[in-house]
Image (tube, rainbow, N blue to C red):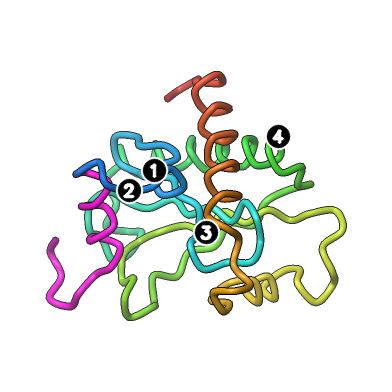
Amino acid sequence: MTTTQPCMTCELIDRRDRGEAPPWDMIHRADHWDLVHAYNTSLPGWLVLVARRHVAAIDELTEEEATELGVLLRRSSAALRQVVGCVKTYVCQFAEQAEHPHVHFHIVPRMADQPDDRRGPRVFGYLGVPEDERVSEEKMNEIAAGVGQYLATNNSNR
């Protein structure tokens, strides 16, 4: 890790490297990116694509990381459409949270019946919710299995 402040994202990557992460936190591991389910959301299928090395800004990505990112954004969105039935996905990147100053992309399913007050940037109302409102670990693991299976069987360009 090349940052002086603590980075929970790097700690989670280390946990994956040790093989200690639950299925929802290890959906797919590519050369430069990890795909995981968000742990603090009430929206099933809210995925996060995480750079495997600590990088604080998109312009710090290598060409290889950027190329793989584009492929994984497309493939993860297609997997979500198949697994959770969304009509499209939103993709956002900020890396501004104190514990997550690490480039990561939110891949958020936009469901056909999603209320107007949870569309566009208001979708973030589903994130950071109290624990009793969060998607259950069982449901996250179920989605992870479906997305992982889709990615494994539709494996073009890795």
Name the front one of labels 2 and 3: 2
Q: Tag 1: Cα neighbours inside 10 Å, few (<14), some, or many (≥20)?
A: many
**Pointer 4 local density, CA inside 10 Å: few below 14, some 14–19, many at least 20:** some
Secondary structure of the residue carrying numbered label 1: loop
Decide: marks 1, 2 in contact (CB < 8 A)? yes
| Tag 4: amino acid | Gln
Find the distance from the CA under tag 1 to the CA under tag 4.
19 Å
Residue pictured at 36% horizontal, 59% vertical: 58
Q: Which residues are magenta?
A: 1-17
Residue position for label 1: 26
Mark 4 or mark 1, which is nearer the start of the sequence? 1
Question: Which of labels 3 and 4 is toward the front?
Answer: 4
Task: Identify which amino acid the numbered label 3 is placed on.
Answer: His
**SS assignment at label 3:** strand
Q: Secondary structure at mark 4?
A: helix
Q: Earlier in the sequence, mark 3 or mark 4?
A: 4
SS class of the residue under badge 2? loop
Q: Earlier in the sequence, mark 2 or mark 3?
A: 2
Give the CA separation, mark 2 to mark 3: 19 Å
Q: Kindly identify the amino acid type of the residue bearing the numbered disc 1.
A: Met
CA separation in Å, label 1 and label 2: 6 Å
> Which residue in the protein does label 3 denote?
106
Q: Position of residue 99 (x, y in %)?
A: 31, 76
Which residue: 12% across, 64% down? 2
